[in-house]
Image (cartoon, grey):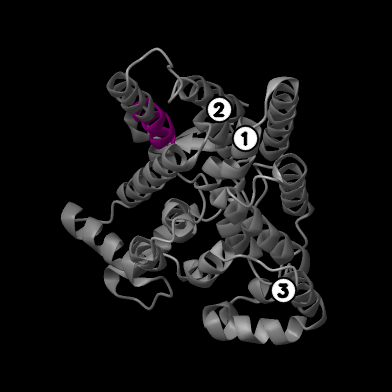
Amino acid sequence: MQGVILYTLLLIVGVCLSVPVGRCETAPGSRQKALDKVLLAGLFVLLFVPAALRIYTGNDYRTYIVRFHDVNVGNYVVTEPGFNVLVKGIYAFLGDEHFLAVFAVFAFGTVLFFLAGIYRQSRDFALSFFLFMALGMYFQTYNTVRYYFALSLVFCSMHYAVRREYEKFVPVLLFAVLFHKSALVVAVAYPFTRMRWRKWFVPILAAFGVSGLLLQEQYMNIFLRLYPSYLEEEEYLAGGSISYVNILRCVLTIALCIIFYRQQLKEDTAAAFYLKLNVLALVMYGCFYFVPFVSRIGYYFNISQILLIPLVIANQEGKKKRILLGLTLAIGLLYFAMFLRQAEDIYIKILPYSTWLSEGGTLVPVY
């Protein structure tokens, strides 16, 4: 129960700190920027500390400890070179296999880039931060640390993709690939999504989705050529299951944008970009669910929801804006409650939360 309280407090305190960011209308620009820096520093500490102090919290925490060791002693590993170099460098610097330090470094970078990405790209920082927390995205970073570090970098790269500043987009993306090669999908998807989609493209996209449902074996063969390491794990070959929650999230986000922001899409390139990413996410979750860990690909697309939803709501006025904001907050809180109910599941396992801070060095389990 204490773990649930901790995560709830992180949400509440974090949202309270996020509300004044960029909102002080009476303050001069320099004063607002200074205030923002203080608030962002507070948010960073709030999120970084529990992530860095955790131990055995996360569905693959123990697995990563073994991976760190294998990297350090030179055993065969399937992890990416950036991850391997970072682990060996930390262990060499500390003179021993202090795995807690590695988790802390990944937490530092992941939290830093997510907050920077939200601050730089969101029309409503507080609402984007709320969605980041309530939809469980922050808490999921306790799992698969190298993937979520890559996702945080990809999230930041959206800023350059929207502006077609590919000379900046490509280096950030390549750096992300050094930690998780699944980020390569973005190299095609983001520039493609930034393009103007003609009407004739809709049936082609629909046909692509149907092909996924009809040619599952063929697509799996292609996937396994790209990820041959999955051949060693039978549970990966079993594929995934349909994520109705992610499908519903995409449908609601797309509907919100089309109903309340359709006329502005031609001029708002960022909104159009985020909308198309959610369309791609819907195709992935609905038609390619059989691909192992399809969520790792889908998250590169639907992470844009924390930017698109606030953008649409920020451009509404009066009663309509208040209703949409209220519904978003209510749905977000309901989602958060459902997420916490499943947090002890073997595929999530962020509860119970345990920290290595205790008297005598013993672990303190928090349930």
Q: Nearer the viewer, residue 93 or 97?
A: 93
According to the picture, the residue beneath numbered tag 3 turns out to be 238
- Given this view, does label 3 or label 2 mark the residue nearer the observer? 2
Give the secondary structure at mark 3: loop
Residue type at mark 1?
Ala
Q: Nearer the viewer, residue 340 or 40?
A: 40
Residue 125 vertical position relative to residue 223 in the rendered view, above or below: above
Residue drawn 68% across and 25% down?
317
Q: Magenta residues: mostly which secondary structure?
A: helix
Q: Which residues are magenta?
A: 41-50
Q: Nearer the viewer, residue 128 or 75?
A: 128
Residue drawn 37% across and 42% down?
112
- Give the mark, 2 or 1, whose residue is nearer the N terminus: 2
Residue type at mark 3?
Ala
Image mark for residue 11 = 2
Mark 2 to mark 1 CA distance (whole Å): 7 Å
Residue drawn 65% across and 86% down?
221
Residue 269 vertical position relative to residue 115 in the rendered view, above or below: below
On the image, the x and y values in percent for residue 19 come to: 50, 22
User: Does residue 227 show up magenta in the picture?
Assistant: no
Quadrant assignment, res 77:
bottom left
According to the picture, the residue beneath numbered tag 1 turns out to be 134
Quadrant assignment, res 334:
top right
Give the secondary structure at mark 1: helix
Quadrant assignment, res 235:
bottom right
Question: Is 187 displayed left or right of 262 in the figure?
Answer: left
- Given this view, does label 1 or label 3 mark the residue nearer the observer? 1
Question: Is 142 displayed left or right of 86 in the figure?
Answer: right
Residue type at mark 2?
Leu
Q: Crowdedness of circle 1 by 10 Å Cα count: few (<14), some, many (20+)?
A: many
- Give the mark, 3 or 2, whose residue is nearer the N terminus: 2
Q: Are marks 2 and 1 in contact (CB under 8 Å)?
A: yes
